[in-house]
Amino acid sequence: MSARSWLRRTYIERDRRERALREAMLAAGPACADTDAALFTAPDVFEPEPVAVRQDREAAAKKICAACPARTACLAYALAIRPTEGVWAGLSATEIRALSLYRPASEPGREVA
Ligand code: SF4
């Protein structure tokens, strides 16, 4: 298999996996479906959000996530897509990125020193 073909298959498979995770999250009944999306995402990059305002907004979003039936599916989806902003499964994008960097030692392919 050529490198180009391998790369194409890899992207197709990743896209398929992400779509399945997104559908699972939506099927689980996300609590944020009927709320203002602006509560979960940062404002426009040209309008910096003051730290205190962001903290309040994220805290309010995380409260909704805490009671969300789709939280586990949302976390799986967020770990797959690694968002750069917003609140997902009760975590900020920064917290999601930190979690996605963690891989248990038992995970296949991980080298243990
Ligand atoms: S966990 Fe939070 S961000 Fe994820 S679907 Fe539920 S309410 Fe929305």
Image (cartoon, grey):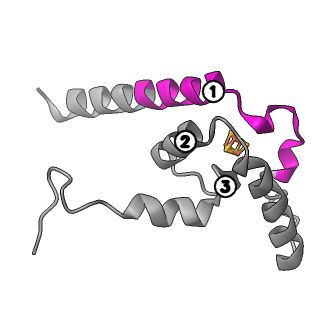
Tell me where the magenta segment starts and ends, as one range: 16-39
The disc, 3 or 2, on the residue closer to the chain's N-terminal end is 2
Report if the CB atoms under discs 3 and 2 are less than 8 Å apart: no
Q: Which image quarter is the N terminus in?
A: top left
Residue at left 59%, top 40%? Answer: 74
Question: Which residue is nearer to you in this view: 61 or 101?
Answer: 61
Q: Quadrant of ligand 1?
A: top right
Q: Residues within 10 Å of mark 3 (few under 14, many from 20)?
A: many
Calculate the distance from the C-alpha at mark 3 to the C-alpha at mark 1.
Answer: 16 Å
In the rendered view, does 9 fall on the left or right side of 24? left
Query: Disc 3 marks which residue?
Result: 90
Q: Determine which quarter of the picture holds residue 2.
A: top left
Residue 25 on the magenta span: yes
Amino acid on which the number 2 mark rests in the picture: Thr
**Percent from the top left, x then y, of residue 4?**
23, 32
- Say whether mark 1 is within 8 Å of ligand 1: yes
How far apart are the alpha carbons under marks 3 and 2?
10 Å
Q: Residue at x 50, y 62 (%)?
A: 97
Q: Is residue 11 left or right of residue 48?
A: left
Q: Main secondary structure of the magenta part?
A: helix
Element type where label 2 sits in the image: helix
Is residue 111 found inside the magenta-colored segment of the image? Answer: no
**Badge 3 amino acid:** Gly
Label 3, ligand 1: CB separation under 8 Å: yes
**Residue 52 shows in this picture:** yes
Residue on which the image places disc 1:
28
CA–CA distance in space, label 2 to label 1: 9 Å
